Image (cartoon, rainbow, N blue to C red):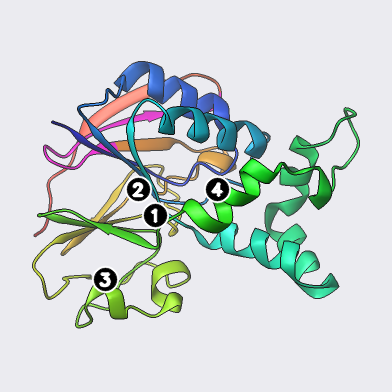
Amino acid sequence: MRVLAFGDIHGCLAAFDTLLDWVKPTREDVVVTLGDYVDRGPDSRGVLNRLLELRERLNLICLRGNHEKLMVDAYRGGRGEKRDWLSVGGVETLASYSILPGRSGSLEEISAAHWDFIISDLLNYYESDRFIFVHATVLCGFEMEDQPENALFWEFLPDAMRHHSGKMVICGHSAQRSGLPKVIPGAVCIDTRASMGGWLTCLDVNNARYWQADMLGNRREGELEYDE
């Protein structure tokens, strides 16, 4: 059984589909997506549709990212919350929902199924026997159920992240300008800037092999050496 983690997709459906076609996850695999499905890239709507489809045929675990939180805040809040979300990629997300090409969409055009998924179906973290999966970071001395939201969704990668459980942390959020996954003591970050001209990464956490695809369909792969 493989345990496959996907980094921050950010509306990059073409890169996501390229990876899915290459890696070919099956129902025997555990597939964990680390959040930030929306914003910045050109097809947030398509990414959410793909996740809903995959959920029907894969063992798929979808985490919540800070961009999903911002999107929900914009939906539930006022002008300030909407302005904050639009400034960090919400404009591109709304455009993907527009009925007419070239016109900005609206929050009202987002389907109920997508709101249900974003609001109700995402997890704040996921643990296996060897790994902790989270969008941003963890506080190493805290149990996972006691982690503050600021750590789970907003903090950036520290120099080390050795959780007291001894489990390796697999995270996104801290975009790596190198385009490569970053290994630190106790953790691996696989946000490799898919929506900013970089790569989308899938990591098989059990054997440290990774695959990457970009929006042009280019592919590359490699293997990490964990610092446990």
Q: Is residue 226 above or below residue 50?
A: below
Q: Residues within 10 Å of mark 3 (few under 14, many from 20)?
A: few
Q: Disc 1 vs disc 3: which is toward the camera? A: 1
Q: Residue at x 41, y 53 (%)?
A: 63
Q: Residues within 10 Å of mark 2 (few under 14, many from 20)?
A: many
Between 167 and 143, the residue placed more toward the observer is 143
The answer to whether 150 appears left or right of 99 in the picture is left
Determine the CA span between mark 1 and mark 2.
5 Å
Magenta range: 203-215
Badges 1 and 2: C-beta atoms under 8 Å apart?
Answer: yes
The answer to whether 150 appears left or right of 160 in the picture is right
Q: Quadrant of residue 174?
A: bottom left
Q: Earlier in the sequence, mark 4 or mark 2?
A: 4
Q: Residue at x 17, y 53 (%)?
A: 128
Between 114 and 103, the residue placed more toward the observer is 114
Q: Disc 4 vs disc 3: which is toward the camera? A: 4
- The residue identified by callout 2 is 190
- Asked if residue 84 shows in the view, the reply is no
Between 198 and 164, the residue placed more toward the observer is 164
- The residue identified by callout 4 is 117
Q: Earlier in the sequence, mark 1 or mark 4?
A: 4
- The residue identified by callout 3 is 159
Q: Disc 3 vs disc 2: which is toward the camera? A: 2
In the image, residue 228 lies in the stretch drawn in magenta? no
Q: Earlier in the sequence, mark 1 or mark 3?
A: 3
Q: Residue at x 39, y 23 (%)?
A: 20
Determine the CA span between mark 1 and mark 4.
20 Å
- The residue identified by callout 1 is 172
Callout 3 amino acid: Asp
